[in-house]
Image (cartoon, rainbow, N blue to C red):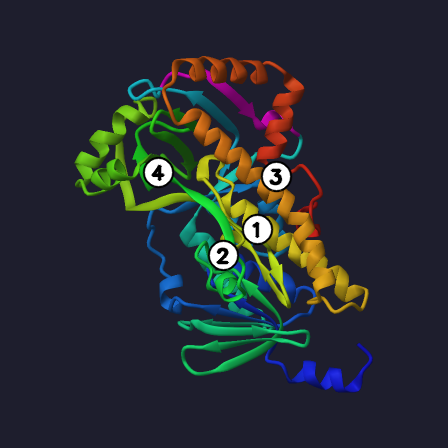
Amino acid sequence: MDNPGQRRILHAMDSDLIIVGGGLNGPALALAAAQTGLRSIVIDALPADTREKVDFDGRSYALAQSSKRMLAALGIWADLAENAQAMNEIKVSDGRVGDASVFLGLHFDSAEIEEGPMGYMLEDRYLRRALMAAMEAEPLVTHRAGETVIAQACDVRHAEVSLASGETLTGRLLIGADGRKSGTCARAGIRRTGWDYGQTALVCAIGHEKTHGGIAHQLFLPPGPLAILPLTGNRSSIVWSEKHAQARAINALNEEQYLDVLRPRFGDFLGDISLEGQRFTYPLNLTLANSFIAERMALVGDAAHGMHPIAGQGLNAGLRDVAALAHVITHAVRRGEDFASVLVLERYQSWRRWDTASLAAATDLFNRLFSNDNALLRMGRDFGMALLGGVPGVRRGFIREAAGLTGDLPDLMRL
């Protein structure tokens, strides 16, 4: 660190962090790094006007209480709060098609913890635009929209990427925040472990006659889980899993036919329903990078781990990656360490690998256990849910886990 030649090399670099991926985790990391005085270039394959669209497209996220804390620490929650719907209760039930309104499972109420709601539902358009605006306002962050990386090289001195436009960028640390099919991960030679679930998620938003009361529902049906998550107003976000062929057939239907298939699964507890925004489908699989780090490189979010959406923890796990990586980088900078060294990055990996592996295993187990109509399994899981729901201490632990308040929290997720 005291070598004058080394200082000249670092000064000549284009940035401290080169972040590949302009979705949500990449911009969040750039903003977190800026708080430590580090410069970031965010390379985004999508054009800026695509990211900045204001239309509601039906996509929403369940943000844990800890993720809300992080967005507040990054200075953007104040702009998001009015469009966020608090999740005050979660009801989990084991059902069959046609009896979605029957509650025979777990009930979690945020009144049992002191920190407030377990989480918030927020539409993609609001979160995406808030992150874009924050990047634009931050002088230490450069957003390179409409650019793709075609090659990368990392060594003990620096990281380098080549863009499709012909430009080459250098930095101290390369970050892969480019999704489940991460090119950053593949170019680093990191293998992945995982499997296909044989399920596709159908995602949409619906309007309904009756108020949801801030209650989220997780209904387990034989083909796969159905989540009904409250949005602002009389609207809810739907994440609905079916076998691949059935999902393709359902998604090909017109709007009224689609709703006719959804209604018996959904039930009538919220009155009549209608579609709001677009419909999406996502094939479901488990994919874990065998390493979250390499020489001067780290992976965050789906680039490191993609799991079943059964617990709604995908974005929360990614933001926890971002907060943990920002934590170890910040503390390394304060100690005068090379924050991009393998020694520092190992701290990030050891922190996050166990958490993500255990979460992936739990979601995998729950999906396999509940995505069937076996009478013996049904009896066993219903008994287990009743037992868990009847023990206040265990129930409170589940509530705190759902809120992201357990374990060793990074600085950005602490009050």
Q: Earlier in the sequence, mark 1 or mark 3?
A: 1
Q: Nearer the viewer, mark 4 or mark 1?
A: 4
Amino acid on which the number 2 mark rests in the picture:
Leu
Q: Quadrant of the N terminus?
A: bottom right
Residue 111 magenta: yes
Mark pair 1, 2: CA separation: 9 Å
| CB atoms of marks 3 and 2 within 8 Å | no
Q: Earlier in the sequence, mark 3 or mark 4?
A: 4
The 10 Å Cα crowd at callout 1, few under 14, some 14 to 19, many 20 or more, is many
In front of the other: 273 or 395: 395
Query: Mark 2 or mark 4: which comes first in sequence?
Result: 2
* Distance of label 3 from label 2 (alpha carbons): 18 Å
Residue at the image position 61 percent from the left and 33 percent from the top: 401
Horizontal and vertical percent position of residue 44: 45, 67
Q: CA distance from mark 3 to mark 4?
A: 27 Å
| Lateral position of residue 230 relative to residue 344, left or right | left
Instruction: Return the residue at label 2.
Output: 24
Q: Which residue is mark 1?
A: 319
- Residue on which disc 3 sits: 404
- Span colored in magenta: 101-113
Q: Quick check: 170 above or below 298?
A: below
| Residue 170 horizontal side relative to residue 104, left or right | right
The earlier-in-sequence mark between 3 and 2 is: 2
